Image: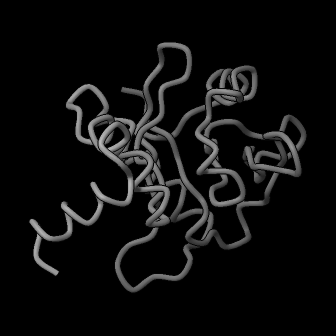
């Protein structure tokens, strides 16, 4: 179906009022977020009470996972090696983390080390009905769901 026919079909199915809301330039950001959610695309930025972060993956093309030391190195290279203050800020304002990330991303804070084990870093992930903080050893591997945040 060509673009004009697709647009006419969508307008007919939604009705004029909803179609006009959809195409309004005032709603571009919301429509983009909704379409990305439908497509299963995770957000690449998040704003938490005025602090904006880039959400960055750790894997390069062809990789399924990386070792902990590689993850830490890449986080530093991307200036995304955040610590305890940022992790606790995220948890304190977790209601602002987009729902699309629930169960799909774990945020690793490579500079937030366990007080009794410097070989463990903090992470924040979705658990049932809220975001929680845990610890993971750097001797493990980190897959595609692991993300780091870079504050803008």
Task: Point out residue 53 in the picture as x, y percentages from the top left corner.
Answer: 44, 32
* Figure check: 56 above or below 46: below
**54 lies above or below 63:** above
Q: Going 41% across and 45% down the picture, which residue do you hit? A: 33
State left or right for residue 106 relative to residue 23: right
Q: At 43% across and 25% down in the image, what residue appears?
A: 52
The residue under the point 45% across, 70% down is 59
Q: Quadrant of residue 150?
A: top left
Q: Which residue is nearer to you in this view: 108 or 105? A: 105
Query: What residue is drawn where x is 56% and y is 77%?
Result: 65
Q: Give how far across and how far down residue 142 sits, in percent.
A: 63, 69
Q: Name the image quarter holding residue 130.
A: top right
Query: Observer-nearest residue: 129 or 72?
Result: 129
Q: Is residue 19 above or below residue 2?
A: above
Q: Can you say which quadrant of the picture contains the C terminus? A: top left
The count of marks equals 0
- Horizontal and vertical percent for residue 38? 48, 62
Q: Quadrant location of the N terminus?
A: bottom left
> Which residue ends up furthest to the bottom in the rendered image?
62
Q: Is residue 145 left or right of residue 13?
A: right
- The quadrant in which residue 83 appears is top right
Residue 97, percent across and down? 62, 35
Question: How is colour applied across the structure in the image?
Answer: one colour
Judging depth in this view, the residue of 109 and 145 nearest the camera is 145
């Amino acid at each position: 179906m060509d673009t004009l026919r697709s647009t006419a079909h969508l307008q007919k199915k939604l009705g004029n009022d909803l179609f006009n809301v959809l195409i309004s330039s005032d709603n571009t950001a919301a429509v983009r977020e909704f379409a990305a959610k439908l497509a299963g695309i995770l957000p690449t930025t998040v704003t938490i009470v005025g602090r904006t972060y880039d959400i960055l993956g750790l894997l390069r093309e062809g990789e399924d996972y990386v070792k902990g030391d590689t993850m830490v190195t890449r986080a530093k290279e991307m200036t995304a090696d955040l610590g305890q203050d940022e992790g606790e800020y995220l948890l304190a304002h977790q209601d602002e983390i987009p729902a699309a990330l629930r169960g799909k991303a774990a945020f690793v804070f490579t500079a937030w080390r366990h007080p009794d084990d410097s070989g463990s870093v903090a992470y924040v992930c979705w658990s049932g009905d809220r975001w929680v903080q845990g610890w993971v050893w750097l001797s493990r591997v980190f897959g595609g769901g692991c993300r780091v945040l870079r504050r803008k």
